[in-house]
Amino acid sequence: MNELEKYWKHGVGAAKIRWGTPGDFTRCTRHLAKHVGLARAKRICAQWHHDQDGIWPGHHGGDNPNGPG
């Protein structure tokens, strides 16, 4: 795990994102997009969301059998 990932997953950045609460993926993409662009931020945040919460963004723990959207 690199320093950037530590910051956003466990450090001060994690407090800004508030992993495990509603809107965490959106907050992550907004913060990271400033640094890496929106498309890359979405990819990174999707993986980190899965790492932190155990589910992919939009799947809400499997409550939606058809997937997101």
Image (cartoon, rainbow, N blue to C red):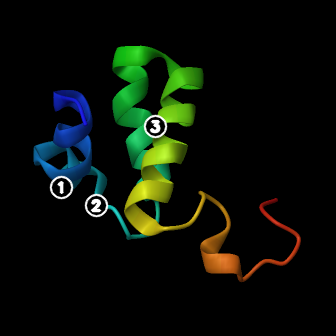
Which is nearer the N-term, disc 1 or disc 3? Answer: 1
Q: Which mark is residue 18?
A: 2
Verify CB contact (< 8 Å) between mark 1 and mark 3: no
How many numbered dots are placed on residues in this image? 3
Q: Write down the residue under mark 3.
A: 29
**How would you rate the neighbour count of disc 3 (Cα within 10 Å): few for under 14, some for 14-19, many for 20 or more?**
many
Residue furthest to the right: 66
Q: Secondary structure at mark 3?
A: helix
Q: How busy is the neighbourhood of tag 2: few (under 14 within 10 Å), some, or many (20 plus)?
A: some
Residue 35, given in percent of the width and then of the height, sits at: 34, 17
Query: At x 26% / y 49%, what residue is drawn?
Result: 9
Q: Position of residue 4 (x, y in %)?
A: 22, 29
Quarter of image, res 6: top left
| Tag 1 secondary structure | helix
Q: Amino acid at mark 3?
A: Thr
Q: CA distance from mark 1 to mark 3?
A: 14 Å
| Amino acid bearing label 1 | Ala
In the image, taking residue 13 as reference, residue 63 lies left or right, namely right
Q: Residue at x 39, y 43 (%)?
A: 28
| Residue that mark 1 sits on | 15
**Mark 3 / mark 2, whichever is N-terminal:** 2
Q: Locate the C terminus and report the quarter of the image it occupies.
A: bottom right
Q: Is residue 52 above or below residue 4?
A: below
Q: Nearer the viewer, residue 14 or 31?
A: 14
Q: Are marks 1 and 2 in contact (CB under 8 Å)?
A: yes
Q: Position of residue 61 (x, y in %)?
A: 61, 78
Front position in the image: 47 or 41: 47
**Identity of the residue furthest to the front in this view:** 1
| 69 displayed left or right of 61 | right
